[in-house]
Amino acid sequence: MIRFWIRITLNLLLFPVLYPRKKAYPALREHFSIDDDVPARADFVVALGCSLRADGSASSPTRAIAERAARLFKEGKVSKVILSGGNPVNGVSEGEAMRRLLEREFSLAAPDVVMDVLPDSLYVGTLDQARSVGEILKKHGAKNAILVVQPQQLPRALWVFRSIVPSIRFYPANPAEDYDPLSTQVRMHSRWRFRLWNMVAWAGLWRTTDDIKKQ
């Protein structure tokens, strides 16, 4: 626990200085930024929700994620879409908010859209999503998938998914990097808030690296 808080403190002190210097510190930058690597064809695209508004509708970040996933499907890059996201607001989960958006604006629904059923009363993190989505992919015999996640979170999510489900090849795809002052999650109100939160989340993963690799 002491090492964990030491890492948090060091990150908070050094990150604002080191992060902008992409050429000088590429390894650090790659923890918070990654380019698209979208194949010509994949079995699935996996969209991870990223907060909601108070009425249960998709926040701007979640909307951007759902829209990128829908476009990949419409472009013929994937066979199906998996929507993953818990953390309900006003009785609506992130996954359900994305499902409604895809149905309303892209005319996408089952069987082309597969829902990741997650707990509706507890906080759902990336580790939980990786385990749950991994089971769906294995059930469908998938060999690869495109992962669409909030751009700053994408490197971390990609690392988690590749660690939890090593039998599936995951490719990164960035949605638009949007933020939303109306999001119920304060960290999604602005880029700097999310950047600080994401840094803490990376430090948290360092604590659980051994447990993740044992999965």
Image (tube, rainbow, N blue to C red):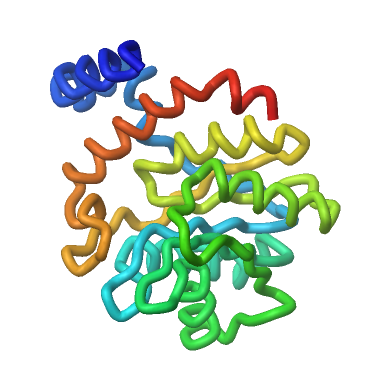
Give residue 156's position: percent from left, percent from top. 46, 35
**Relative to the observer, which residue lies in front, 169 or 195?**
195
User: Which residue is drawn at the image coordinates 64% and 23% (left, top)?
Assistant: 213
Asked where in the image residue 20 lies, by quadrant, the reply is top left
**Total marks in image:** 0
Query: In the rendered view, would you say 114 is above or below 102?
Result: above
Asked where in the image residue 13 lies, by quadrant, the reply is top left
The quarter of the rendered structure image containing the N terminus is: top left
Query: In the rendered view, would you say 64 is above or below 159?
Result: below
User: Which residue is drawn at the image coordinates 63% and 69% (left, top)?
Assistant: 115
Give residue 145's position: percent from left, percent from top. 67, 50
Residue 188 visible at all: yes
User: Which residue is drawn at the image coordinates 42% and 68% (left, top)?
Assistant: 88
Give residue 80's position: percent from left, percent from top. 70, 66
User: Which residue is drawn at the image coordinates 58% and 61% (left, top)?
Assistant: 118
**Relative to the observer, which residue lies in front, 3 or 73?**
3
The quarter of the rendered structure image containing the C terminus is: top right
* Horizontal relation, residue 28 to residue 99: left or right: left
* Horizontal relation, residue 192 to residue 120: left or right: left
Query: In the rendered view, would you say 150 is above or below 4?
Result: below
Residue 24 visible at all: no
Give residue 148's position: percent from left, percent from top. 51, 53
Query: In the rendered view, would you say 100 is above or below 80?
Result: below
